[in-house]
Every structure is written in structure tokens, then in C-alpha cells.
Image (tube, rainbow, N blue to C red):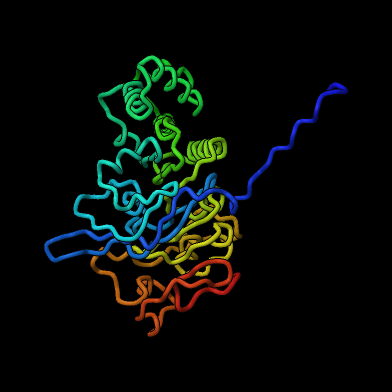
């Protein structure tokens, strides 16, 4: 540094609590219309995500995680009836028609699917799929879109980007396919990324690499991220906050560190105990007995009661979601801290 040069300013880190809210979901409900009327699928789901923040939707298959994401994206089935409010970047999008909602996808919302082999087109080259997206959403020329696509593949750690653009999805490994999906999701500079079980089909080593890549993209681009998973241990390492769902209900909601270390809902505790590699001294796994009840067969009262060892007569009445200690919990008999 010369005598007259000014020192470099320190990087200013804005706390999450002070950042702009990208997504607000308020009292979201979703039902399917059938011959008998309306079949409830998701009831009273609320959460928000700020810039640079990752929020997890957690639960077993059939708990309502993916259909909640579909409602946000505007890709729920045609017979879905959706209530509540969905606000993206200050604009309420709940009442937008399917055509207007689809315009937000890609440009303002990116989606990373669980299985790229079914999400990516098998007969179109990787380059065709990426450049079509860039031309449609950003108005780029073919040459500019091709250059941008190559830069994106390089950014997500794919070597020989130009060669990959000429290839097809079946020619890539699982990890490479997921990197292509991530490149597509961020290609148009969205403010929100929805990742639906993005590492489930990958082996442990590739899972870690993909999670590291998602973390890097989130921080570099200040993305809001909705991360859908069944694995609470991943949530503790990767996400800032978590929303635990069971049978269409939110049963616990709060900081991911609080939920993974000291869960208050018996279902959240069960998810943690069922994780194979949880570093808490346990030598055996404790599975949650039973299964998630099918839609239309939810019990009266607490929906988790038939699988819960703490259930009693009081649980025949549905509990409210109430603030307890550090998290919001829907339970008549929540666990004490450290239980």
C-alpha cells in the first residue's frame, strides 16, 4: 500500500433479519376437487424467506412438502383449489392465472428437481434446453445465449462446457445432471430458488458436493432458497430456518439449529432419531412406527397422535400452532428442552 492509497473498506455483512423479504406464504391451503367435493391436502402453512436465506420444508413423503412448492410455483394440478396469500418480491401472485404465473418461473423463480433425468428433455441437447430458456426469458441472441450457457456450466463446476452443451442428459453422471439443473435454475438471475430433494438420488460424496455448490450459489447471488428434504441432519448443516410438516400440517417452525438440537415436537424428534449418522452418541436408530396417513384419512385432532407415544385423550382435539421457547409448535405435549 502506498502512502497515499486509502485502505480497502471492510465488507459490510447485512444480518438476515434486516434483509429484504423475497417470499411470504401466509395461511396457504390446498385441496383437490373431486367427485365428492374438496379433499384437503395442505392446511394453514405460513413462512417467509429473506435474501440470502435458506428455509427448509421437512417431513416424510406424503406430508405436503412438494405440493406446497408446486402451489408457490403455480404448477399445481388443474383440480387444485388454493387459498391464502403468496407474495413474491412484494407482489401478491396468489391470484395470477397460470399463464402469468408461468412467466415468473425461470426469470424470478428457479426450480431444482429431485431427478434431472425426468426434468431434462431426453431428446434435446443440453445446449438447446439452456439457450431456449435464456432466449425466452432474457431475450438473448443465439450466440449470446450459447456464451452465457457455457459460462453457467463453468460456474457450477462442469469441465469442457462447450462439449457438454452439445451432449444429452443420458450421457452425464447423476452429479453432472444435477449441476446442469442448478445452472438452469440460476440462469436467468432469479431471486428465489426452490430445491426439491436435490440430493436424494446421489451418493453421499456427490450429495456433499452438490450441497456445497448450492451454498456457494446462495451466498454469491444472495438467493432466497426453499429447500425441500426429509433429512433433518442436512437441514441443520445447510438451512437457517426449518418448517417441519406432517400430514399437511406445520407441526414445528423455527431456527434450524433450535429444531435439530432441541426439537419440541415428537415428530421432529423422531425424524432426528431416524437419521443414520447423527453425532449424538446413539448406536442404534429409532424408526418412527407406522406411516403417514393417506390424504382423506387424517385422524381427528392431532394428525400425528396414532404414531406418538405421548398421545392421550387430549390429542383427540387438534392443537394450535403456538410459540414455545424458541420454536412454534403444534402439540399438546411438547418435549422439554434436552429430552
Spot occupied by residue 200 in the image (x, y as percentages of width and height): 41, 44
Spot occupied by residue 216 in the image (x, y as percentages of width and height): 55, 36
Question: Can see residue 171?
Answer: no
Decide which of 283, 312 is in the foreground and name it: 312
Location of residue 220 with respect to 124 vertically, above or below = below
Spot occupied by residue 1 in the image (x, y as percentages of width and height): 83, 23
Location of residue 157 with respect to 79 vertically, above or below = above
Location of residue 287 with respect to 55 vertically, above or below = below
What residue do we see at 51% from left, 52% from top? 235
Quadrant of the image occupied by residue 13: top right
- Extreme residue in the right direction: 3
Decide which of 47, 127 is in the foreground and name it: 47
- 205 left or right, relative to 184: right
Quadrant of the image occupied by residue 125: top left
Question: Can see residue 154?
Answer: yes
Decide which of 67, 50 is in the foreground and name it: 50
Decide which of 265, 91 is in the foreground and name it: 91
- Extreme residue in the left direction: 35
Amino acid at each position: 500500500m502506498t502512502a497515499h492509497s486509502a485502505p480497502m473498506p471492510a465488507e459490510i455483512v447485512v444480518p438476515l433479519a434486516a434483509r429484504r423479504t423475497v417470499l411470504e406464504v401466509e395461511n396457504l391451503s390446498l385441496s383437490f376437487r373431486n367427485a365428492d367435493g374438496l379433499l384437503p391436502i395442505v392446511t394453514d402453512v405460513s413462512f417467509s424467506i429473506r435474501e440470502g436465506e435458506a428455509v427448509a420444508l421437512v417431513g416424510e413423503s406424503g406430508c405436503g412438502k412438494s405440493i406446497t412448492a408446486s402451489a408457490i410455483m403455480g404448477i399445481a394440478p388443474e383440480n387444485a383449489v388454493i387459498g391464502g396469500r403468496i407474495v413474491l418480491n412484494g407482489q401478491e401472485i396468489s391470484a395470477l392465472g397460470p399463464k402469468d404465473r408461468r412467466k415468473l418461473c425461470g426469470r424470478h423463480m428457479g426450480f431444482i428437481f429431485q431427478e434431472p433425468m425426468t426434468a431434462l428433455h431426453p431428446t434435446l441437447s443440453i445446449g438447446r434446453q439452456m439457450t431456449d430458456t435464456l432466449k425466452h426469458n432474457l431475450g438473448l441472441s443465439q450466440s449470446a445465449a450459447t456464451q452465457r450457457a457455457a459460462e453457467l456450466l463453468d460456474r457450477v463446476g462442469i469441465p469442457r462446457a462447450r462439449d457438454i452443451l452439445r451432449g444429452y442428459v443420458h450421457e452425464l453422471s447423476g452429479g453432472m445432471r444435477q449441476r446442469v439443473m442448478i445452472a438452469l435454475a440460476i440462469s436467468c438471475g432469479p431471486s428465489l430458488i426452490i430445491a426439491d430433494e436435490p440430493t436424494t438420488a446421489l451418493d453421499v460424496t456427490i450429495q456433499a458436493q452438490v450441497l456445497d455448490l448450492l451454498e456457494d450459489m446462495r451466498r454469491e447471488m444472495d438467493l432466497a432458497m426453499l429447500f425441500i428434504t426429509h433429512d433433518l441432519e442436512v437441514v441443520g448443516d445447510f438451512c437457517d430456518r426449518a418448517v417441519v410438516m406432517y400430514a399437511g400440517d406445520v407441526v414445528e417452525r423455527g431456527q434450524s439449529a433450535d429444531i435439530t438440537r432441541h426439537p419440541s415436537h415428537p415428530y421432529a424428534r423422531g425424524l432426528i432419531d431416524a437419521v443414520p449418522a447423527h453425532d449424538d452418541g446413539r448406536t442404534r436408530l429409532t424408526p418412527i412406527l407406522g406411516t403417514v396417513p393417506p390424504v382423506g384419512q387424517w385422524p381427528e385432532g392431532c394428525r400425528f397422535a396414532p404414531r406418538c407415544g405421548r398421545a392421550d385423550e387430549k390429542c383427540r382435539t387438534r392443537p394450535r400452532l403456538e410459540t414455545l421457547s424458541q420454536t412454534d409448535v403444534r402439540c399438546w405435549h411438547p418435549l422439554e428442552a434436552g429430552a
